[in-house]
Amino acid sequence: MRELYVEDIKTSIKDCKNIDVFKNKVIFITGANGLIGSFIIDLFMYLNNNENYNTTIIANSRSIEKLEKRFSNYIKNKNFKYYIADINEPIKYEERVDYIINCASNTHPLQYSTDPINTIMTNIKGTDNILRFAAKIKAKKALFISSVEIYGENVNNVERFKENQMGYIDCNSLRAGYNESKRAGEALCQAYIESKGLDISIVRLPRVYGPSVKRDDTKAMSQFINKALAKEDIVLKSDGNQYFSYLYVADAVSGLLRTLIAGKKGDVYNLGNIESDIRLKDLAKKIANIAGTEVIFDIPSEKEQRGYSKATIARLDYSKAVKELNWSPSYSIDEGLKRMIEILS
């Protein structure tokens, strides 16, 4: 691993207090190849190799080829196993599992418009399959990763969304499939807690970025970064006034793992970083400045527009996580962007 990326892993470990509860445990991770799932796996394999944690990872993915390519260094490691399956099908894994982290979801805006059915079903049917599996194997705890997207449009003009504040979502739009299915996924968690006695906590993430991102990711941040790496001008397909919360992946993972350790059954926690709340045009400008390029404005295609969020202000109040989980982020947007670009380059 590159030295900077190892530093990110070490920081995430430091910020996740009591992480040693995962020693000698088995963790089942869906969406293993993704931005968050892959970082979690790298973190635990680092702990196994350097701190003798003996934490076994069960990496779930639909593609063995992609999984073997991403985790080629771990394939022969006794603490790395994989389960190749689509979580929209019943999970048939039979061996011991202590913790489940559900990272599987379509998170690319282009997928929302080109693959809307699978986007919805992964968040609902896939979540149902994961929770049925958790009940069957009597998992100690499961973590459902939700999104800032469930807040919808900020019609009440709140400065930052608290966990109990909901905005407006037009359920009869194609783009709503992701937002509404994430809301339904959260409701499913509450149903399984009540009916099956499962211990589940929910985390709502802002827009997460970092060097473990897939290179074909279509989110605005990822497109900006790809342009920067290619030393090309950044194309902004809006006025850029959208005001969002962002979080570096190392901070997101420390918060997720803290929630898995200390989160209350059925509770929801926002994660965020006040030093990383930024308007889209300012984000584009920061990335362009690092790359030595420019920001230009363009009109999005109809297909692109159908995948865009309608939210213009979506900032998260994460004070509950700070107070109840004893968690705080380490990376500002400036530091995170510089690290991401340097590692990927």
Image: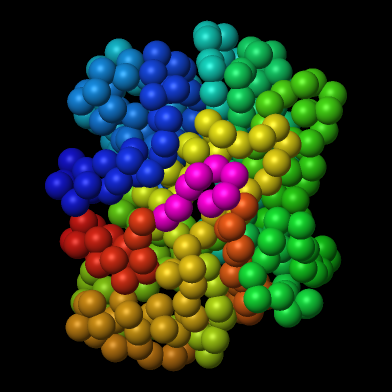
Residue 42, above or below 324: above
Count how many numbered circles sit on residues in the image. Answer: 0
Name the residue nearer the viewer: 164 or 230: 164
Q: Quadrant of the N terminus?
A: top left
The answer to whether residue 55 is left or right of residue 134 is: left
Q: Which residues are magenta?
A: 321-329
Residue 196, picture quadrant: top right
Q: Which quadrant of the view contains residue 303?
A: bottom right
Locate the C terminus by quadrant.
bottom left
Q: From this viewpoint, which residue is outermost toward the left?
A: 3
Which of 300/246 is in front? Answer: 246
Q: Residue 94 versus residue 273: which sits nearer the camera?
A: 273
Q: Is 328 part of what is drawn in magenta?
A: yes
Vertical placement of residue 229 versus 147, above or below: below
At a point 80% along the width and 69% down the height, the residue shown is 168
| Near-viewer residue (208 or 34) | 208
Residue 316 drawn at (x, y percent):
60, 64
Residue reaching furthest top? 95
Q: Is residue 180 visible?
A: yes
Q: Taking 259 as reference, is 164 left or right?
A: right
Is residue 56 at all visible to an observer of this figure? no
Answer left or right for 284 relative to 245.
Answer: left
Query: Percent position (x, y) of residue 6?
Result: 21, 43
Q: Is residue 90 left or right of residue 25?
A: right
Q: Is residue 241 above or below residue 319?
A: below
- Please, is residue 98 above or below residue 14 in the view? above
Residue at image coords 57%, 50%: 323
Task: Locate residue 67, reporting x and y percent.
Answer: 37, 33
* Residue 318, magenta (yes or no): no
Report x, y in % for residue 60.
48, 29
Q: Residue sitting at 26 percent across and 18 percent down? A: 52
- The residue shown at (45%, 60%) is 247
